[in-house]
Image (tube, rainbow, N blue to C red):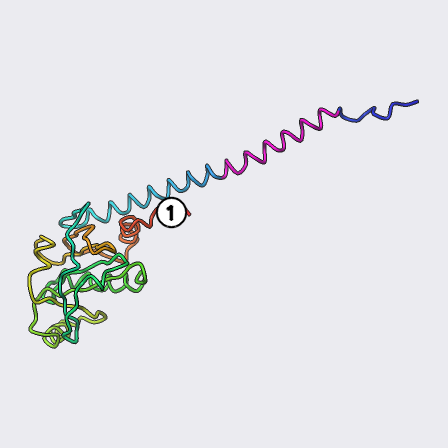
Amino acid sequence: MRDQSYGKPPAYASLLAGLFLCLFLLAAPSSRAEEETADCAVRGAALSEAAATFTEGFRSFSQHDSGAFLGDVTVYDMADQPHTLFPLLEGRYTLINLWATWCAPCRKELPSLVSLETMRGGEDFDVLFVSMEYPDDAAALSESMARRGIKGIMPYYVTDYDIWQSVQAFGLPVTLLVDPEGQIVDTMEGDAVWDSPAALAFLEEATGRSAEEACP
């Protein structure tokens, strides 16, 4: 009688093949995870490099581990109504631009700040314009803006020096990155192109969103 097992692989060979297949399938996700981690590191490094390039362009750039609290500062809207800053800042990162109509570098960067506000403004980020020319009232500020062709923003203004004492900066423009608790994170003196890729990379890194977006 012919042995019917002739020509069939031994049972242990099938067992080994199945084992190798299982090991391959288990290793594949790990390899993919390693590739994603490597890609994440590359993207994170690119963000850091772009952010560093952006900050080098300022006249002065300062980071603060525990910056001044701006929540108590009073600003006035274009209806001459007073507002304490904190309710305007609470719960989101805010870029506060200190500017004046007579300041040429301020006027130069305003369009890019307006563009940034359009691109990134929302529940977790906002841009706030605060005039530092101490106008008598909103009408005087509006007249000054119209005279210099400044459009597209709805600024606030101040009537005292409280915000300067908190910022301790010299000259305009000055831009402050303020955290959701109302504390200054970064102080930047000088103008910039705020809707550039480098500026966006800086903001992603500074607000802590770079890790989430670069490494989903």
> Would residue 39 appear left or right of 162 to someone viewing this image?
right
Q: Which residue range is magenta in the image?
A: 11-32
**Residue in view at x 29 percent, y 44 percent:** 48
Q: Give the residue number, with chain letter if any, for mark 1.
A: 214
Residues packed near mark 1 inside 10 Å, few (<14), some (14 to 19) or many (20 plus)? some
Say if the magenta span includes residue 23: yes
**Residue in view at x 46 percent, y 38 percent:** 35
Furthest-right residue in this view: 1
Dominant secondary structure, magenta: helix
Q: Amino acid at mark 1?
A: Ala
> Would residue 168 appear left or right of 123 to someone viewing this image?
left
Say if the magenta span includes residue 85: no
* Above or below, 63 relative to 25: below
* Above or below, 185 relative to 102: above
Q: Position of residue 99 (x, y in %)?
A: 13, 62
* Above or below, 128 relative to 5: below
The number of discs equals 1
Q: Position of residue 52 (x, y in %)?
A: 24, 45
Q: Hey, which quadrant is residue 190 in on the image?
A: bottom left
Q: Position of residue 161 (x, y in %)?
A: 6, 61
Say which element carries label 1.
helix
Q: Hey, which quadrant is residue 73 in on the image?
A: bottom left
Q: Nearer the viewer, residue 17 or 43?
A: 17
Q: Position of residue 53 (x, y in %)?
A: 24, 46
* Above or below, 82 relative to 95: below
Q: Quadrant of the N terminus?
A: top right
